[in-house]
Amino acid sequence: GDSVTQMEGPVTLSEEAFLTINCTYTATGYPSLFWYVQYPGEGLQLLLKATKADDKGSNKGFEATYRKETTSFHLEKGSVQVSDSAVYFCALSPTYNQGGKLIFGQGTELSVKP
Amino acid sequence: EPEVTQTPSHQVTQMGQEVILRCVPISNHLYFYWYRQILGQKVEFLVSFYNNEISEKSEIFDDQFSVERPDGSNFTLKIRSTKLEDSAMYFCASRMGAAGGYNEQFFGPGTRLTVL
């Protein structure tokens, strides 16, 4: 079945460091891909999305490119801030699924130190 | 800004008891979802609901689970006889739904269910 795999956390970085969180997926067809973020004590928030191959999603300095050839959707940010400390979830919505369910990776905790 | 709300934030119950988790989706949304996250594990899809009926459910969503939209605002998840392994964070989500394209799912803050 469809699945998402993320790199293990926690990831600890210093402020202004470069961030990469790896995400790969297994799916039939052409799923839509997402990154969600969960700040402490809050629900999941959509960070960015891409709905077809080679699309780049971006928001708040974060970027991810839908790479069908490598079945990947890695999250990057050039310079992280303390306020970016959160748990990041990669997710997909299967092509065949009109109900729009999301299949999540296990989440990667990011901690940014001043 | 509209948001999805969930109550209670934390529910503690004894094994075998029934629990009802409540959610108020965003008012003009048409699709509703429940997900759960067992501590340290993935967020897992449980069920989707549209037009007053279940549109899809996972293998986790067995006969012990049910969902209902009893009025125009609430969306509930009932677990009839809780088991220890039902302990998890339960997230409600909703999306507007429209022909063509994808609409963002908006998530509530979650209800932490602890079964003793």
Image: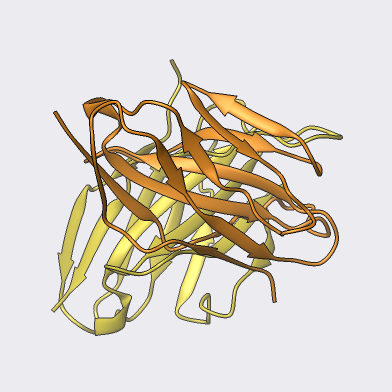
Chain colours: A orange, B yellow
Q: Choose between A67 and B102: the one closer to the eye.
A: A67
Q: Is residue A87 visible?
A: yes
The answer to which of B113 and A10 lies nearer the viewer is A10
Q: Position of residue B76 (x, y in %)?
A: 44, 53
Quadrant placement of the C terminus of chain B: bottom left
Viewer-proximal residue among A85 and B59? A85
Q: Residue at x 47, y 59 (%)?
A: B35
List x then y, in percent, for residue B51. 72, 47
Q: Position of residue A86 (x, y in %)?
A: 29, 41
Please determine whether, in this image, residue A82 is positioned above or below residue B78: above
Q: Residue at x 45, y 20 (%)?
A: B2
In-image side of A63 versus B64 (left or right): right
> What x and y, as percent, mark residue B80?
37, 76
Residue beneath the point at 82% across and 54% down: A30
- Number of numbered callouts drawn: 0
Residue at left offset 70%, top offset 38%: A50
Left or right: where does residue A112 sit relative to residue A36?
A: left
Instruction: Farthest residue to the top: give it.
Output: B1
Q: Is residue B73 something one can see in this rendering?
A: no
Foreground residue among A4 and A40: A4
Q: Is residue A113 above or below residue B56?
A: above
Query: Residue B30 appears in which quarter of the rendering?
Result: top right
The quadrant of the picture occupied by the N terminus of chain B is top left
